[in-house]
Amino acid sequence: MITMKDVIKEGHPTLRAVAEEVVLPASEEDKETLQSLIEYVINSQNPEIAEKYGLRPGIGLAAPQINVSKRMIAVHVTDEKGKLYSYALFNPKIVSHSVEKTYLSSGEGCLSVDRDVPGYVPRYARVTVTGTTLEGEEVKLRLKGLPAIVFQHEIDHLNGIMFYDHINEQNPFEAPADASPLER
């Protein structure tokens, strides 16, 4: 089981590396890693389990955040209508995106960042993501709103990009052009 001790922090070189593709069909070791990522995210959202094991609540986690430089992510998040998006994916890819942008009005956070980083993080309002599930099934997800933002955040980790790399340094709270805010 992954705990907060397993989550590496900003400044660690793995967080800035481009992660390797997972060879499919996935090895047992890679499957176990991906399974543990989704279990962490689900468990961290359960107040009793989170308190018992000292888990910081999260809605997504990427393998590089546990010092495994491979292209694997786990997301467990609901959209504004309460629909659950719970996915553990090998080799996720954004295959298309909208021109329109969005951002969380409250800003973004990250399990690998222990400080508050104020500012708006521009993201695509809609993305289409492909990937392979734990069962080896190819999926194509059309996402918008919070699920789209979370997938972009986690896929950024696979490319060595941190969320605050997107924040406008001169004016962190300037609304990004062509972007509408998303309340959370």
Image: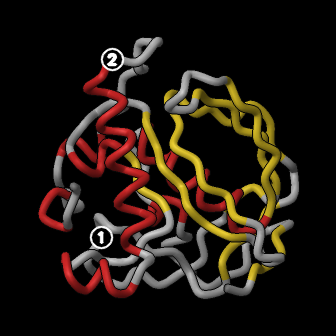
Please state which of residues 34 and 101 is positioned toward the viewer in this rendering: 34
In front: mark 1 or mark 2?
2
Task: Kindly identify which numbered label has been placed on residue 113.
Answer: 1
Residue 9: name its quadrant: bottom left
Residue 52 x, y percent position in the rendering: 20, 82
Q: Secondary structure at mark 2?
A: loop
Q: Secondary structure at mark 1?
A: loop
Amino acid type assigned to the residue bearing label 1 in the image: Val
Quadrant of the rendering where the C terminus is positioned: bottom right
Q: Is residue 18 left or right of residue 114?
A: right
Give me the residue at 46% from left, 12% from top. Answer: 25
- Vertical side of 68 occupied by 109: above or below: below
Colour mapping: secondary structure
Disc 2 marks which residue? 27
In front: 60, or 110? 60
Q: Nearer the viewer, residue 6 or 84?
A: 84
First along the sequence among labels 1 and 2: 2
| Residue drawn at x 43%, y 52% as measured from the top left | 38
Say which quarter of the image contains residue 122: bottom right
Residue at position x 26%, y 75% in the image: 55
Please report the residue visible at 50 percent of the width from the left and 67 percent of the height from the top.
59
Task: Count the numbered circles shown.
Answer: 2
Quarter of image, res 50: bottom left
Q: Is residue 28 left or right of residue 109?
A: left
The quadrant of the picture occupied by the N terminus is: bottom left
